[in-house]
């Protein structure tokens, strides 16, 4: 039975999707805790309602990113996670933190990486006239929005799309893809070789 800790900063809709999938699909795993860097994060209430332990490590109470990450790591490790999942966790993590969870920390980013790292991905894609956009689940490394790609989802850009409509369409696929990627990890179905992630059963790592 694998232990999963999820980090959020707000509502955590991907966290909700993972929690529901873990329960309904009876993964060989449990969500040990949901942790936020913001005391008012709405996702904490959802987790508590589902019997999941919650914690807050408020980044505003620390003088440096390193001090915050050290305390966050201490709290996380209290739950002995096999996997750490970032679900809308809006903090840039230090190299020491990412090294500690190397190859056992996943993130989802709302673009087809390596394109459009960072913020405002959908707005930038529209400005560039992209015909397709999407989202990427990847292992987290010290380099922002890089790391071995586990899965990607692709959606078309329609005439008249704006940032809100595009984001909503991508998010629907995120809610399918991210739980599947987490399930692959806890079931031991992922391999990493030379920076490339494979699915050992040969399942498609693309979603549309």
Image (spheres, grey):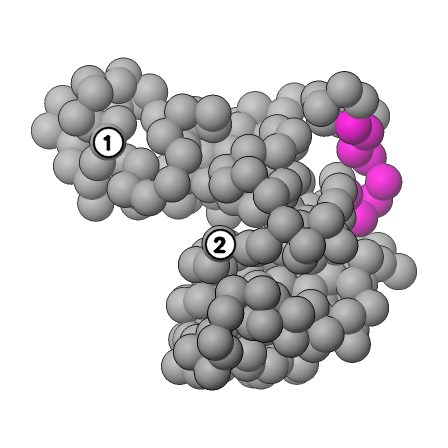
Is residue 107 toward the left or the right of residue 188 in the image? left
Confirm whether residue 109 shows in the render: yes
Residue at image location 47% in from the left, 83% down from the top? 61
Which of the two residues, 94 or 46, is positioned nearer the viewer here? 94
Q: Give the percent coordinates (x, y) of residue 179.
A: 62, 47
Is residue 179 toward the left or the right of residue 153 in the image? right
Q: In which quarter of the image is residue 22?
A: bottom right
> Magenta part of the protein: which range?
185-192
Residue 102 marker: none
Crowding near the residue tagged with mark 2, few <14, some 14–19, many ≥20 C-alpha atoms within 10 Å: few
Residue 124 marker: 1
Assign a secondary structure to mark 1.
Answer: helix
Q: In this view, does 133 lie above or below 33?
A: above
Residue at image location 80% in from the left, 48% down from the top? 186
Please name the residue that numbered disc 2 is placed on. Answer: 92
Outermost left residue: 160
């Amino acid at each position: 039975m694998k232990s999963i800790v999820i980090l959020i900063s707000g509502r955590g809709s991907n966290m909700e999707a993972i929690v529901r999938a873990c329960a309904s699909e009876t993964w060989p795993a449990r969500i040990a805790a949901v942790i936020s860097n913001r005391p008012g994060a709405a996702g904490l209430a959802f987790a508590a309602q589902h019997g999941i332990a919650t914690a807050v490590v408020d980044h505003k109470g620390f003088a440096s990113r390193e001090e915050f990450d050290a305390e966050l790591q201490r709290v996380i490790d209290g739950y002995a996670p096999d996997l750490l999942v970032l679900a809308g966790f809006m903090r840039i993590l230090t190299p020491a933190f990412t090294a500690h969870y190397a190859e056992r920390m996943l993130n989802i980013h709302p673009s087809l990486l390596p394109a459009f790292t960072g913020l405002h991905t959908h707005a930038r894609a529209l400005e560039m006239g992209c015909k397709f956009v999407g989202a990427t689940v990847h292992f987290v490394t010290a380099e922002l929005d890089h790391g071995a790609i586990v899965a990607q989802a692709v959606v078309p850009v329609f005439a008249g799309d704006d940032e809100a409509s595009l984001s909503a369409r991508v998010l629907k696929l995120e809610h399918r893809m991210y739980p599947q990627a987490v399930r692959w990890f806890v079931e031991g179905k992922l391999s990493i070789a030379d920076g490339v992630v494979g699915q050992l059963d040969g399942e498609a790592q693309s979603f549309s």
